[in-house]
Image (cartoon, rainbow, N blue to C red):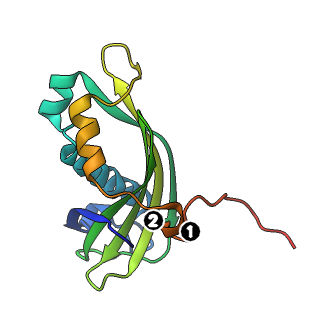
């Protein structure tokens, strides 16, 4: 994945393993959420930044694709690629990989900046906008092939 940013590292905790013997689907969502929290810190929206700016980020949409199993104590890392953005939204692609760099799952998300007191969408604060601008963004021709796909049963 071109110009992605490794943001989360960890391992599959015992309580994340389900009756099938691998990481439960809800835990993939947890890891993707943790990776986005790290992205928030990178752009200045950690706890102190959220308080300073009275601003946060909400997830509007999340499309997870499960590609392979992750097992107890397996080391994992997540990387984030910014596909697109505007003054208050960021379209991201997150990949969860194992120690051999095999992609186990992907999460494509649309996140939106929110004014905390009003709970309404708002443009990124200037400081945050500047940090977002410093992160490289993928050109549409560089997007992962699985990005921006529609879910559905394909019929012949």
Disc 2 crowd, CA 10 A, few/some/many (<14, 14-19, 20+): many
Q: How many marks?
A: 2
Label annotation for residue 146: 1
Q: Is residue 50 left or right of residue 111?
A: left
Q: Quadrant of the C terminus?
A: bottom right
Q: Is residue 6 left or right of residue 88?
A: left
**Which of marks 1 and 2 precedes in the sequence?**
2
Q: Residue at x 36, y 58 (%)?
A: 27
Q: Secondary structure at mark 1?
A: loop
Q: Please name which of the two marks, 2 or 1, marks the residue nearer to the observer.
A: 1
- Of residues 149 and 32, the one nearer the viewer is 149
Q: Position of residue 150 (x, y in %)?
A: 67, 58
Q: Position of residue 133 (x, y in %)?
A: 30, 46
- Of residues 59 and 68, the one nearer the viewer is 59
Q: Residue at x 40, y 76 (%)?
A: 103
- Whether the residues at callouts 2 and 1 have beta carbons within 8 Å, the answer is yes
Vertical order, 9 against 87 (above or below): below
Q: Residue at x 12, y 31 (%)?
A: 48
Q: Which residue is mark 2?
A: 106
Q: Position of residue 124 (x, y in %)?
A: 32, 31
The outermost residue toward the right is 156
- Of residues 73 and 111, the one nearer the viewer is 111
Q: Residue at x 32, y 66 (%)?
A: 4
In the rendered image, which quarter is residue 22 located in?
Answer: bottom left
Q: Is residue 134 left or right of residue 19?
A: left
The outermost residue toward the left is 48
Q: Secondary structure at mark 2?
A: strand
Q: Quadrant of the N terminus?
A: bottom left
Q: CA distance from mark 2 to mark 1?
A: 9 Å
Label annotation for residue 93: none
The outermost residue toward the top is 118
Disc 1 crowd, CA 10 A, few/some/many (<14, 14-19, 20+): few
């Amino acid at each position: 994945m071109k110009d992605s940013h490794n943001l989360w590292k960890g391992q599959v905790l015992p309580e994340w393993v389900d009756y099938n013997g691998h990481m439960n689907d809800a835990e993939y969502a947890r890891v993707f959420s943790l990776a986005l929290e790290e992205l928030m810190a990178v752009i200045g929206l950690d706890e102190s930044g959220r308080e300073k700016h009275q601003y946060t980020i909400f997830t509007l949409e999340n499309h997870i694709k499960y590609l392979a199993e992750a097992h107890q104590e397996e080391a994992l890392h997540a990387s984030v690629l910014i596909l697109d953005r505007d003054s208050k939204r960021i379209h991201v692609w997150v990949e969860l990989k194992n120690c051999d760099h095999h992609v186990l799952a992907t999460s494509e998300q649309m996140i939106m900046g929110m004014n905390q007191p009003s709970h309404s969408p708002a443009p990124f604060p200037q400081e945050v906008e500047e940090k977002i601008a410093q992160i490289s963004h993928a050109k549409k021709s560089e997007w992962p092939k699985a990005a921006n796909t529609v879910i559905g049963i394909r019929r012949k």
